[in-house]
Image (cartoon, rainbow, N blue to C red):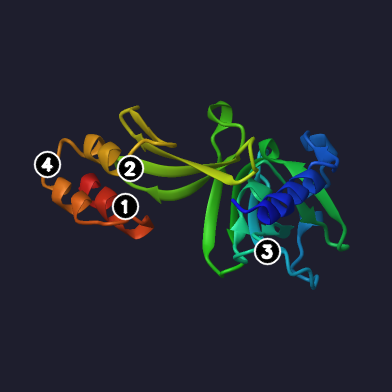
Amino acid sequence: MKLTQLYILSAFFLLTNCVTVSNQMSELKPAENYSTQHLEVKDKSAMPAQIIFANGETVAATIRGQKNPFHGILTETSITKYFPIYDNTGKTQYINFNLIKELTIKDFKGEERKFVNMGSDSNSLWEVMYEGTKTNWYKEYSNSSYDQSIQVTDYFMEKNGNTTKVSGLKSMKNQLRKLTASKPHLEDMIDSSPTLGKLAIINILREHDK
């Protein structure tokens, strides 16, 4: 990573760690106070969101995330541990992920994305990539302790209790072969996908779920 990029990312990280974060439901306002349906939020970092709080209350709200300064896309770690939410007066309050059961956003590219609280299994919200009859696929985002770059860990959780974790140097293709070993014909499908992007993996999982 270039030194200039490292400085900018480090600055973002330091700024977002100098805030007061609400960690208890008692520190939140009633859910309806976070409804922004009648509020115009002009912040370019704002995103519409559907939130299910840990107590089951729901609200159509607006939250703020960070854009990658080089690519203009969402920096996922800016919303997976805690994030600022607007109230109906336009003020923001930072809330911890443990107060959230489910968060659905429309990101800066207009893509709808869902993040869920995995309970004691995680220290942040995980993104739901695919939910099937046999297997669910999630992504966990974290920051590198070296340069604050985004680190991604994939989890394939089968309904029989088995979990396949893919991170670091582990090969996605090798792990998918193990996951789909009961259906050998899927190996050709895995090997024929040069990059194994999101859609390719979803198609493989759909075949596996049949």
Q: Which residue is mark 4?
A: 184
Measuring from the top left, give residue 39's x and y in whole percent: 80, 70
Q: Earlier in the sequence, mark 4 or mark 3?
A: 3
Q: Quadrant of residue 169?
A: top left
Q: Nearer the viewer, residue 57 or 122?
A: 122
Instruction: Give the alpha-carbon distance from disc 4 to disc 3, as whole Å.
Output: 42 Å
Instruction: Give the alpha-carbon distance from disc 2 to disc 3, as whole Å.
Output: 31 Å
Q: Which residue is mark 2?
A: 172
Q: Earlier in the sequence, mark 2 or mark 3?
A: 3
Q: Nearer the viewer, residue 127 or 14?
A: 14
Three-letter residue code for mark 1: Ile
Q: Is residue 24 visible?
A: yes
Q: Earlier in the sequence, mark 2 or mark 1?
A: 2
Q: Which residue is mark 3?
A: 47
Q: Which residue is pictured at 64% across the width and 60% down the height?
A: 68
Q: Residues within 10 Å of mark 1 (few under 14, many from 20)?
A: many
